[in-house]
Amino acid sequence: MMMIARARHWAATSHLSDAMVERMLLLAALSAVSTLALITLFILREGMPVILDRGPLEFLAGMKWAPSRGHFGLLPMIAGTAVVTLGALVIGVPLGLAGAITLAELAPRTARQYLKPMIELLAGVPSVVYGFIGMEILVPFIRERGSLGGPGYSALAASIILGIMVLPTIIGISIDALEAVPRAYRDGSRALGATQWQTITGVVLPAARSGIVAAVILGMGRAVGETMAVIMVAGNAVQFPGSMLAPVRTLTANIALEMSYASGAHAQALFATGIVLFIVSLSLNGVAGRVRQAARGTGTPGAVR
């Protein structure tokens, strides 16, 4: 009888502990959601007045950003962000995909075990380090040694630095997508007489397409949100980018450069810039999530979970 009573007491105690842990985890999750909701409400409260006052079209499509004169047109910064992000993807996607294919399909297992963690460590390098390297090496190269012309501080320099910075995201997630493709796909292709390269391009890559697309979208999100490295090499001129060698200013750089001394409508305009960035970031993450969900729903083997 005593042993039964102890077992019942132990079961009741364990059940109580599980319930407490479950509630604590639920509380932690709710606190994170609440924090995000509060941040959203705060940004909307601070930024919406200037958007409503100027009008969304004038705010987003205006060409002139002169806070001291009451002009808050974001189009030069939106164009600068788009040019720099697209340039980063042009550089980062081919390199990242090539690296992922090499490590997942061609390199020896031992090399993959060492190289993949090293590439993932690049994501932990502070962005100011990338910016400093860009200032010391890349910008002088573009201005002088590369014979490209211009001041060196340009959309091209920012695109190259961001293209390198998005590599860990693209390579890491793409490797996971490629490794998720079942071995039977490769064996079946090779049994039909296909070469290794034909198997990779005709079987493995299509099967891992959803995971690779998600990797590219998340890399794009990293490029859009990067601030410090871009400030250090982009030139930060408020102008519509005429070429890749011209200085540009991105949305994140606009906030970081001016928030320290902004007040009144100027500060509201910077918060409104944050709203634009917030919507862009949420949209990219939402698209990446939908791609992953669609892949899981259709049973795509290369879907990253």
Image (cartoon, rainbow, N blue to C red):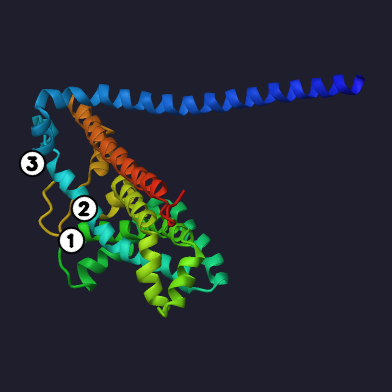
Quadrant of residue 44 within the rendered picture: top left
Q: Is residue 207 visible?
A: yes
Dot 3 crowding, Cα within 10 Å, few <14, some 14–19, many 20+: some
Task: Identify the element where label 1 is drawn.
Answer: loop
- The Cα–Cα distance between marks 3 and 2, rounded to whole angstroms, is 18 Å
> Quadrant location of the N terminus?
top right
Q: Nearer the viewer, mark 3 or mark 2?
A: 3
Q: Seen from this angle, which residue lies furthest front? A: 192
Circles 2 and 1: CB distance less than 8 Å? yes
- Amino acid, disc 3: Met
User: Could you say where residue 28 lies in the image, as x and y percent from the top left?
Assistant: 52, 27
Quadrant of residue 62 within the rendered picture: top left
- Amino acid, disc 2: Gly
User: Residue at image x 10%, y 56%?
Assistant: 242
Circles 1 and 3: CB distance less than 8 Å? no
User: Could you say where residue 267 lies in the image, as x and y percent from the top left?
Assistant: 22, 28
3 or 2: tag closer to the N-terminus: 3
Residue to which mark 2 is pinned: 235
Task: Identify the element where label 2 is drawn.
Answer: loop
Residue to which mark 1 is pinned: 151
User: Could you say where residue 255 lies in the image, as x and y percent from the top left?
Assistant: 26, 38
Residue to which mark 3 is pinned: 63
